[in-house]
């Protein structure tokens, strides 16, 4: 974000957005890890196919929820930026060395 030349108001708004989404993401990440580990154990063990399918469905739902939250955060931050800052952010995401 430093390379975007944000003003103080933008910086404050973006920090607030980051904090809001981080709370939700921090809640979901451990759950996803646990459910993924459980799925792996089920696949390696003697769990029934229906149980494995149910667990996979739960993992997929969590992955989708995390992805949606990350995208919503991206859009919320995007709304704070000027058009030029948006272009620069996109360019920086594609090539972080610049």
Image (spheres, helix red, strand yellow):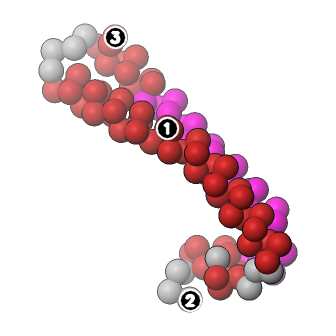
Q: Does residue 58 lie above or below 33 as drawn?
A: above
Which quarter of the figure has residue 44? top left
Comparing labels 3 and 2, the label whose residue is closer to the camera: 2
**Number of numbered discs present?**
3
In space, the residues marked 1 and 3 are separated at their CA atoms by 24 Å
Q: Does residue 9 lie above or below 57 as drawn?
A: below
Q: Is residue 28 left or right of residue 14?
A: left
Q: Nearer the viewer, residue 82 or 13?
A: 13
In space, the residues marked 2 and 1 are separated at their CA atoms by 32 Å
Measured as percent of width and height from the top left, residue 15 is found at: 68, 64
* Residue for point 57% across, 37% down: 65
The residue that disc 1 covers is 28
Looking at the image, is mark 2 or mark 1 earlier in the sequence? 1
Q: Which mark, by number, is residue 98? A: 2
Q: Residue furthest bottom?
A: 98
Measured as percent of width and height from the top left, residue 34 is found at: 33, 33
* Residue for point 40% across, 17% down: 54
Q: Does residue 42 lie above or below 90 as drawn?
A: above
- Identify the secondary structure beneath mark 1: helix
Measured as percent of width and height from the top left, residue 46 is found at: 15, 15
Label 1 crowd bin: few (<14), some (14–19), many (20+), radius 10 Å:
some
Q: Does residue 45 lie above or below 29 as drawn?
A: above
Looking at the image, is mark 1 or mark 3 earlier in the sequence? 1
Quadrant of the image for the N terminus?
bottom right
In space, the residues marked 3 and 2 are separated at their CA atoms by 49 Å
Mark 1 touches mark 3? (CB < 8 Å): no
Q: Which residues are magenta?
A: 59-87
Q: Is residue 3 magenta?
A: no
- Identify the secondary structure beneath mark 2: loop
- Identify the secondary structure beneath mark 3: helix
Q: Which mark, by number, is residue 50? A: 3
* Residue for point 58% across, 50% down: 22
């Amino acid at each position: 974000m430093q390379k975007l030349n944000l003003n103080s108001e933008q910086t404050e708004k973006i920090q607030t957005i980051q904090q809001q989404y981080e709370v939700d993401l921090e809640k979901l990440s451990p759950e996803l890890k646990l459910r993924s580990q459980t799925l792996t154990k089920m696949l390696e063990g003697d769990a029934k196919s229906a149980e494995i399918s149910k667990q996979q469905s739960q993992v997929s739902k969590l992955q989708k929820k995390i992805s949606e939250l990350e995208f919503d955060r991206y859009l919320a931050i995007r709304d704070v930026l000027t058009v030029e800052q948006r272009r620069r952010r996109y360019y920086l995401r594609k090539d972080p060395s610049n």
